[in-house]
Image (cartoon, grey):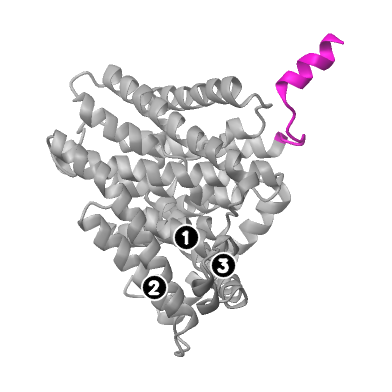
Amino acid sequence: MENLSSYTVLFFFCGLVILSYLFSVINRVTRIPSVLLLLGTGMLLRYVAGLTLPSFQIPPAFVEILGTIGLIMIVLEAGLDLDVTRKKLPLIRNSFASAFIILVLSTFSVAGILKWWIPDSSFANDVVYAIVLSIVSSAIVLPSVNHLSDEKREFLIYEASFSDVLGIMAFNFLTTGEIITGRSVSLFLGSIPVAIVLSVVVSFALMMLLIKNRVNVKFFLVFAVLIVIYVGGKMMNLPSLITILMFGLVVNNWELIRWKPLKNYFSDENVNDVAAFLKSITAESSFLIRTFFFIIFGYSIKIEALFDLEVLKLGSAIVVALIVLRYIYLRILHKYTLLPELFYIPRGLITVLLFYKIPQWVRIETFDEGVLFFVILATGIIMMFGALFFHDKPVEIDKIVEKSSE
C-alpha cells in the first residue's frame, strides 16, 4: 500500500464512483440491482488485492463509521421522499403493519431455525441474530423501485423504512443488557414518546438553522447535528432514528402544518427551497456512501465460505422461511397479486452493520459469517428476478376471482 501514489489513490476512488454511477444506469435499464454489481466489484477487488497487495486490510472501525453515516443518510432520504396525506394513511398503516408483522414472524422463525441448527446456543441469542437477518434493507430497496407504480413504490419505501427503524429499536433493546427486566421494558417503551417529542423540537431547530442562518455552510452542519443526535440518542438508549425520519417527513410535508405563527416564521416557499436542496444533497451523499460501503462489504466476503455445504443449507433454510412468511402475509391480508412485493426482501447495510455490533456476550461462536453473506446475496438476487419479471399493475385477487366465475 505504501507504494501507491496519491494520484493513484485518487484515480482509483474516483473510478469507483464513476463505475457506481454506470451501475445505477444499468439498474434503470436492466433492473439488475446496482448493489449486486457493487458487491461483485468488491469481491473482484479482493481477488486482485490477493495477488498484488496480500497484506492489505480494511479497518473494521472504518466500515462501522461508514455504515452508521450511511444508515442516517438513508433514513433521512426515505423521510424526504415520502408524502403524508389523508389519502395515503391506509397505505402508511398497511406498510407499517407489513413491516412489523413480517419482522416479528421472521425473527421467531429464523430464531427457531438457528436453535434447531445450533442446539447449544441460547434462544435469546438466536433472536438477536434473527432480528439482524430479518430487517429489510432500505439501502437496497430505495434505488430499486423507480420502475414501479407510485402505490407500490411508496408501499415498499415505507415498509423498508419502518423495518429499519423497528429492527434497530428491537436490536438495541435486546443488546443493552444481559438480563431483560420489567424496568428495562418500561424504559424502552417510555423512550418512544420521548424520541417523538425530541423529534418535534429538533425538526424546528434544524429548520431555523437552515432557513434563518445567514452562513453559507449549513447543510453539512445539519448532517453533523443529525449524527450527534443519533449517536447521543444511542448512548442514552433512545430510538433516535425516529428523530431523523421525522425531520425528513416534516420538511417534505410542511404544507400540512396549520399553525399560522409558525407558517409566518417559516414560509412554504422557504421550506420548499430547503426541501429541494436537502433532497439533492442527501441523495448525492447517500449514493457516495452506499457505493463505498457495499464495495467494502463485497471486499470482505470470503468467497470460499459461500461454497461450504453447511452454509448453503442453513442460508437456504433462512431465505426460504423469509419468502414463505412474506407470501403468507401478503396473500392473506393484502389481497393483491404478489408481484413484485413478494420478492423485495433484500438484506444489506443494516444487516451488516448490526451483525458486527452484536456484543460479545450475545455472540454464537459456531455461527458462520458465510451465512450472513449468503442471505444478503440470495435475497438480492431474488429481488432482481422479481424486478426483471414484473410488468403488470396491481390487480385485486377478489376481482380476478369474480371475472373468472362470470
Element type where label 3 sits in the image: helix
What residue is shown with label 1?
Answer: 76
- Residue 361 in sight: yes
Q: Which residues are magenta?
A: 389-406
> Are the residues flagged by discs 1 and 2 in contact, CB closer than 8 Å?
no
Image quadrant in which you'd find residue 258: bottom right
Query: Which quadrant would the N terminus be assigned to in this image?
Result: bottom left
For badge 1, the amino acid type reads Leu
Measured along the vertical axis of the image, is residue 111 above or below residue 93?
A: above
For badge 2, the amino acid type reads Ala
Query: Which quadrant would the C terminus be assigned to in this image?
Result: top right
First along the sequence among labels 1 and 2: 1
User: Closer to the camera, 403 or 264?
Assistant: 264
Residue 323 in the image: state x and y as whole percent.
52, 26
Q: Give the residue displayed 83% in from the left and 9% down from the top.
A: 405
User: Closer to the camera, 259 or 172?
Assistant: 259
What residue is shown with label 3?
Answer: 279
The circle drawn on residue 205 is: 2
Q: Residue furthest front?
A: 260
Q: CA distance from mark 1 to mark 2?
A: 16 Å
For badge 3, the amino acid type reads Lys
